[in-house]
Image (cartoon, grey):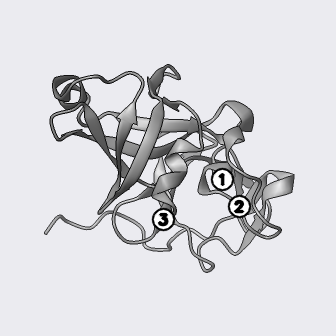
């Protein structure tokens, strides 16, 4: 998938608000009101989900009107729908900055420069960002903390990063 066509998760529909067909959207963006500036918000398959025509801040995002929603029932039916924006609608990051989504697809190398795999996804399970690594040799993916210690070198423009996987072998027993 190219950077231009990559979809970035920006929010999730929380359901209807009030009785006039407004929709509540939980925003995953730094500025929740920016959701209206990104243009139509898409489903994971790239089809249009919502076109916000007006918004106002809410405690977790925005409440607003959408071209596709006329009633509270329609808004409630969309509850839980994840909303995406194509990567190319975001402004280019400043020098030495990047979007986490730009890490997807990077080659992962060990400290000697040998290919270990590639970044399949970036996840956050509540603590730090984790890189899901698809091994070059196949097999199950594994996670690497996205920290300076675990990923000491990042060469985004060259398409790779260096990984220092944890040295602990084996899996611990569940608590």
Quadrant in the picture for residue 124: bottom left
- In front of the other: label 1 or label 2? 2
Q: Are marks 1 and 2 in contact (CB under 8 Å)?
A: yes
Which structural element holds mark 1?
helix
Q: Is residue 61 visible?
A: yes
Q: CA–CA distance between discs 1 and 3?
A: 12 Å
- Image-based side of 23 in relation to 16, left or right: right
152 is higher (above) or lower (below) than 114: below
Percent x, y for residue 127? 37, 71
Residue at the spot of label 2: 98
Q: Please rate how many residues cluster around mark 1, counting C-alpha atoms within 10 Å: few if below 14, some from 14 to 19, many from 20.
A: many
Residue nearer the viewer, 118 or 53:
53
Residue at the spot of label 3: 129
- In front of the other: label 3 or label 2? 2
Which structural element holds mark 2?
loop
Percent x, y for residue 65? 37, 35
Q: Which label's residue is closer to the chain start, 3 or 2?
A: 2
- Image-based side of 151 in relation to 175, left or right: right
Q: CA–CA distance between discs 3 and 2?
A: 14 Å
Residue at the spot of label 1: 103
Quadrant in the picture for residue 16: top left
């Amino acid at each position: 998938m190219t950077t231009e066509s990559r979809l970035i998760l920006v929010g999730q529909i929380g359901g209807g608000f009030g009785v006039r067909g407004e929709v509540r959207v939980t925003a995953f963006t730094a500025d929740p009101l920016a959701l209206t500036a990104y243009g139509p918000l898409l489903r994971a398959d790239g089809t249009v989900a919502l076109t916000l025509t007006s918004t106002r801040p809410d405690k977790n995002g925005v409440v607003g009107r959408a071209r596709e929603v006329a009633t509270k029932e329609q808004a409630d039916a969309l509850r839980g729908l994840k909303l995406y924006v194509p990567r190319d609608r975001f402004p280019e990051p400043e020098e030495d900055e990047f979007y986490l989504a730009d890490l997807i697809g990077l080659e992962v190398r060990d400290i000697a420069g040998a290919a270990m795999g590639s970044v399949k996804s970036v996840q956050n399970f509540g603590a730090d960002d984790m890189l899901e690594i698809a091994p070059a040799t196949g097999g199950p993916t594994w996670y690497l903390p996205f920290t300076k210690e675990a990923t000491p070198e990042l060469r985004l423009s060259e398409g790779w990063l260096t990984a220092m996987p944890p040295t602990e072998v084996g899996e611990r027993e569940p608590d």
